[in-house]
Image (spheres, rainbow, N blue to C red):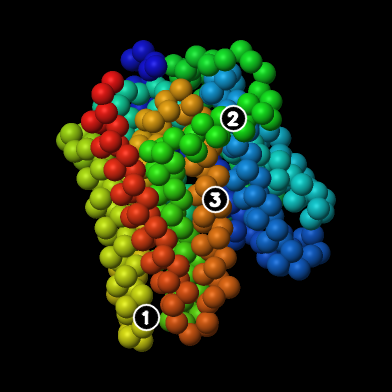
Amino acid sequence: MTAPPGKTDSLAFTCLLGLMATLPGFGTDMALPALADTATSLAVPVHSAGLTISSYMISFGLAPLAFGPLSDRYGRKPVVTLGTIIFIIASVGCALAPSLPALIACRIIQGIGAAAMTLAIAIARDTFDDTVVRQKLSSIVMAIYVSPIAAPMAGAALLELAGWRAIYASLAALGILLLTGLRFGPDNGLKPRSATRLSLRTLVGDYRCVLSHPTCRAYLLAAAASFGVVAAYATGSALFLVQVAGLSSTRYGIIFGLTALAGMAGAFLDGRLNAWGVPSHYSLSIGFTIQALASTVLLAMTFLNWTPTTVVVLLFVAITFSGGIGAPGLMQGALQQLPKMAGTVSAAVNCLIMVSGSLSSALTAVLFDGRTSLSMAGVMEFCSLLALLFFGMAMGRARQQAVMPS
């Protein structure tokens, strides 16, 4: 069911969805430049301050598993509003935290609140019909790529001007801005699916329904594997370019920002292709092919012991571009299978990509030999081939559904 045209077609509504999708990333990336200052202020080691990042990401990865089915039953807007209020209160708590344990506790709660914002893709699916929803999802993906570019710079500026606590105060302010938009913006078209109380049994049943759907499952696994490639790049690029290639942290930050721009360009191109009537499977085929080829080339270069920085960076650009052009189609493909359970599907996507990204990142770091890009290239190659396999399965299932009699 879609909402009536009007406010939901406006630029303001699209920007509201963009803010909703971007704010969770700001919760991580803005805090990164402040880890050392936070540790000094709270009289703890720097590695202990790093727990403020991991604690946030764990709760952010798990909490959507509850928010998704809740939103399917009671509507998106009440759930996102509740999550935003939790995020604001926790952000204020972070800004006032007197100790590291208190800060970590507030970060866990903050991650729980941020998790409700992952429903932006479900809201887009509810609100817009199939002819334009991919364009809206492309805009959301573009907004997500803003975080690794703008958030660290904003965090560093706030750190210089007012200290690390100002970063969390600004996150609270952004939460208030989102809450205001939710309060005065339009509701989406989803009506509550069921009046039954959500129990653990029904929660498990919802996810069993999602994961037992062959086409939806294939899209979810393809998204998880594809994100594993990007996560291996994010971790491995820092290790290789700084420790092996000898780039400064500043130069690496510039390169990382440029590759994020490539991801935005990919998402923008996918939105244009949708406007021109090009089906999503073409964008996905392009994205997965580029991803696999770039990973294969990097792995071959590593075995040949020939990894010039310029060529490696161009391969990184190709990797992030492929992620941007493919993400909207993956989301749309999964959501199309079970439109009445879009919240549960979006939660499953978020959880799977967080797990995949964590495993991929950890493997890349643990296997890093300090001399080559082998761990990064190997993990990227494995994940890219998995993504191609699952995408092929999704296309095969979709063709079977198309020829089956109704």
Find residue 71 and report its horizontal and vertical position in percent.
Answer: 56, 25
Identify the residue under disc 1: 302
**Residue at x 30% of width, y 72% of height:** 297
Identify the image quadrant of the C terminus. Answer: top left
The residue under the point 74% across, 64% down is: 48
Q: Position of residue 185 (x, y in %)?
A: 48, 20
Residue 232 showing in the rendered view? yes
In the rendered view, does 341 fall on the left or right side of 176? left
In the shown orientation, is residue 225 left or right of residue 399? right
What whole-number distance in Å separates the C-alpha atoms at marks 1 and 2? 46 Å
Lower sequence index among marks 3 and 1: 1
Q: Is residue 234 toward the left or the right of residue 258 in the image?
A: right
> Would you name the residue on which mark 2 appears?
205
* Helix, strand or loop status at disc 2: helix
Distance between the Cα atoms at labels 3 and 2?
Answer: 22 Å
C-alpha gap between disc 3 and disc 1? 27 Å
Q: Position of residue 354 (x, y in %)?
A: 54, 50
Q: Nearer the viewer, residue 157 or 351?
A: 351
In the image, what residue type sits under mark 1?
Answer: Thr
Kind of residue at disc 3 = Met
**Along the polypeptide, which appears first: circle 3 or circle 2?**
2
**Secondary structure found at label 1:** helix
User: Are the residues tagged 1 and 2 within 8 Å (C-beta)?
Assistant: no
Residue bearing the label numbered 3: 354
The percent coordinates of residue 273 (x first, y second) are 21, 40
Disc 3 residue crowd, few under 14, some 14–19, many 20+, Cα 10 Å: many
